[in-house]
Image (cartoon, rainbow, N blue to C red):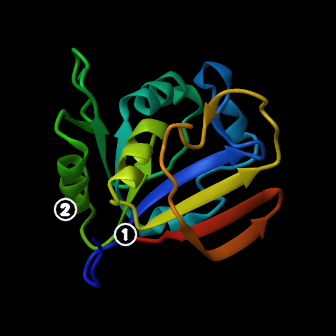
Amino acid sequence: MTDASTGKVVVNRAMSLDGFIAGPGHSMDWIFEHMTSATFPEVMAATGAMLIGRGTYGVGKRMSDEATDYDGGEKFVLTHRPPDEPDPNVTFLTCDIEEAVATARRAAGDKNLEILGADVAAQCLQRGLVDEILVYVLPVLLGDGVRFTPPSRDRIDLEPCSNVQSGGVTVLRFHVRK
């Protein structure tokens, strides 16, 4: 899916050591205890657009008081239920996952398309639309919450390509084998 003139489709996740990307009640405040947008500026600089699930968008809206200054380019939210009031900072998409990825990739230009949200990422992975997975493993055990992937998904093989440690955060990057 990727060629030399375009960026990659990258699932970007912060994760607890026990494999959760959100805590009970979809809480994500624990992430900001360990990371800010300044933690890995090269990721933000490489991102041209973001495709976000509706649930993750909702969590982000609730957390807007703690919002970071992360600029990942144009934001697209894939949903069956667009909000009644438009958000001027977001384009809501009601199409299938392949069309959503294609739309967001065009907006990303030659930069990466970042995928955020458990369900959207799982759909992209299952359909072979993801080039890389970037995981920030944080030094916390949540015990419960939203898993990295749903248990019903098929096996997907990965190839490790880098790992970096910054303070208590370990960053793992994997190519998705196709």
Give the number of callouts. 2
In the image: residue 157, left or right of residue 104: right
User: Residue 70 location, x and y as percent?
Assistant: 49, 50
For the N terminus, the quadrant is bottom left
From this view, report whether residue 173 is shown above or below residue 94: below
Q: Residue at x 25, y 82 (%)?
A: 5
In the image: residue 77, left or right of residue 95: right
Determine crowd level at label 2: few under 14, some 14-19, many 20+ residues with C-alpha closer than 10 A. some
Give whichever of 142, 164 is nearer the camera: 142
Q: Residue at x 72, y 53 (%)?
A: 137
Indicate which disc, 1 or 2, sits on the residue closer to the N terminus: 1
Mark seen at residue 111: none
Q: Quadrant of residue 145?
A: top right
Which element type, helix, strand or loop, lies under badge 1? loop
Determine crowd level at label 1: few under 14, some 14-19, many 20+ residues with C-alpha closer than 10 A. many
Q: Is residue 42 visible?
A: no
Mark seen at residue 8: 1
User: Residue 157 location, x and y as percent?
Assistant: 53, 65
Mark seen at residue 106: 2
Q: Residue at x 79, y 29 (%)?
A: 143
Q: Nearer the viewer, mark 1 or mark 2?
A: 1
Q: Residue at x 68, y 40 (%)?
A: 32
Which amino acid type is marked by label 1? Lys
From this view, report whether residue 140 is shown above or below residue 108: above
Q: Is residue 86 visible?
A: yes
Give whichever of 46, 23 is nearer the camera: 23
User: Residue 129 location, x and y as percent?
Assistant: 33, 59
Measure how far apart labels 1 and 2 are at the Cα level: 12 Å
Which element type, helix, strand or loop, lies under badge 2? helix
